[in-house]
Image: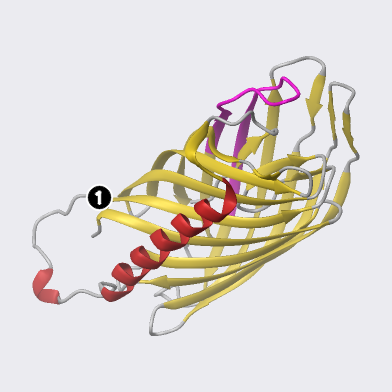
């Protein structure tokens, strides 16, 4: 499930610990423990299978992102917390959606986002919950002959705190991805799709243009269930103006993302790491760790 949340420098609704080092340490500990448990239990014996219908997968799909963002940049990428910055910064974001795989073709999710930012002038700020979001992912067409599988992902996000510019925002995002597998087990194939993001701010004195990404790529999964994939494309952004204080020019620039994932024998995700570069128009670099924390796994 892909999603992004819009944030415009929120006033911090902080926790009793401060800044990036603590959040980084806690997130790393969660990922190490969860990944170790998931990898240790990545396969299951046939004796454990039950003849009756099994309940859906339920899990906290934890994403922790580390990004460096240039000043005066709105960061809108493949999978990210959209960041509007007026000065160069280092950002740590934790997205924690509770997800339910209703079946093999439909996933529902809802969650919150936490973040902290560091600049040369401020140092690390308090960790804050700055957005809530909900959405779904559905396979609307399955691969038949030369026709690829088509997956639609859609979600809505709402900022929690008013920003320092006095702006709240609502973000809607839709992703349509085509997947053409080259074998019946879907271990290798081609990808292609678009991602459209629209941001509405709660004032007539500000405007944020739409973002559109078009991309193509592919994937390969080894017999040991490690999977690598890549997406390469172009992002077009219509620019932004906020209270006559921040003006961002429109641009059309390249974008790329590489993913490495560990799956189980039922194609459930156990662990993932991705690296993304977005030219916006200056380069933004982001590393993301993804560890689902399963309450129930089929």
Residue 161 percent location from the top left of the image: 59, 25
Over which residues does the magenta segment extend? 155-177
Residue 163 percent location from the top left of the image: 68, 26
Q: Which residue is mark 1?
A: 56
- How many numbered discs? 1
Is 161 part of what is drawn in magenta? Answer: yes
**Up-down: is 77 above or below 289?**
above
Kindly identify the residue that appears in the image at 52 percent across and 45 percent down. 153
Dot 1 lies on which element?
Answer: loop
Q: Is residue 88 left or right of residue 52?
A: right
Q: Is residue 252 left or right of residue 26?
A: right
Kindly identify the residue that appears in the image at 84 percent across and 55 percent down. 253
Q: Is residue 55 left or right of residue 116?
A: left
Kindly identify the residue that appears in the image at 37 percent across and 46 percent down. 99
Residue 92 percent location from the top left of the image: 60, 51
In the foreground, 59 or 112: 112
Q: Residues within 10 Å of mark 1 (few under 14, many from 20)?
A: some
Residue 96 placement: quadrant:
top left
**Up-down: is 205 above or below 245?**
above
Kindly identify the residue that appears in the image at 72 percent across and 25 percent down. 164
Residue 177 percent location from the top left of the image: 58, 54
Q: From where the camera sits, is residue 186 visible?
A: yes
Assign the magenta stretch its main secondary structure.
strand
Is 93 part of what is drawn in magenta? Answer: no
Q: Quadrant of the C terminus?
A: bottom left
């Amino acid at each position: 499930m892909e999603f992004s949340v819009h944030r415009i420098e929120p006033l911090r609704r902080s926790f009793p610990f401060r800044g990036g080092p603590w959040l980084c340490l806690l997130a790393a500990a969660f990922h190490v423990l969860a990944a170790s448990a998931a990898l240790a239990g990545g396969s299951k014996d046939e004796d454990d299978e039950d003849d009756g219908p099994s309940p859906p997968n339920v899990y906290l799909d934890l994403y922790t992102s580390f990004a460096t963002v240039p000043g005066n940049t709105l960061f809108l990428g493949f999978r990210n917390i959209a960041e509007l910055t007026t000065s160069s910064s280092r950002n740590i974001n934790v997205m924690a959606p509770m997800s339910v795989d209703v079946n093999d073709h439909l996933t529902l999710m809802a969650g919150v986002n936490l973040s902290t930012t560091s600049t040369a002038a401020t140092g690390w700020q308090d960790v804050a919950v700055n957005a809530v979001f909900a959405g779904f992912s559905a396979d609307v067409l399955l691969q038949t002959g030369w026709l690829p599988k088509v997956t639609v992902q859609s979600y809505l996000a709402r900022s929690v705190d008013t920003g320092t510019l006095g702006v709240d925002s609502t973000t809607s995002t839709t992703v349509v991805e085509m997947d053409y597998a080259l074998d019946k087990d879907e271990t290798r194939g081609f990808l292609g799709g678009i991602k459209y993001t629209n941001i509405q701010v709660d004032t007539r004195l500000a405007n944020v243009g739409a973002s559109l990404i078009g991309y193509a790529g592919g994937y390969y999964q080894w017999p040991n269930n490690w999977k690598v994939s890549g997406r390469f494309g172009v992002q077009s952004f219509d620019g932004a103006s906020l209270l006559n204080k921040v003006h961002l020019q429109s641009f059309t620039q390249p974008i790329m993302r590489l993913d490495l994932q560990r799956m189980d024998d039922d194609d459930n995700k156990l662990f993932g790491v991705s690296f993304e570069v977005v030219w916006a128009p200056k380069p933004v670099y982001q590393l993301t760790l993804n560890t689902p924390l399963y309450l129930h796994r089929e």
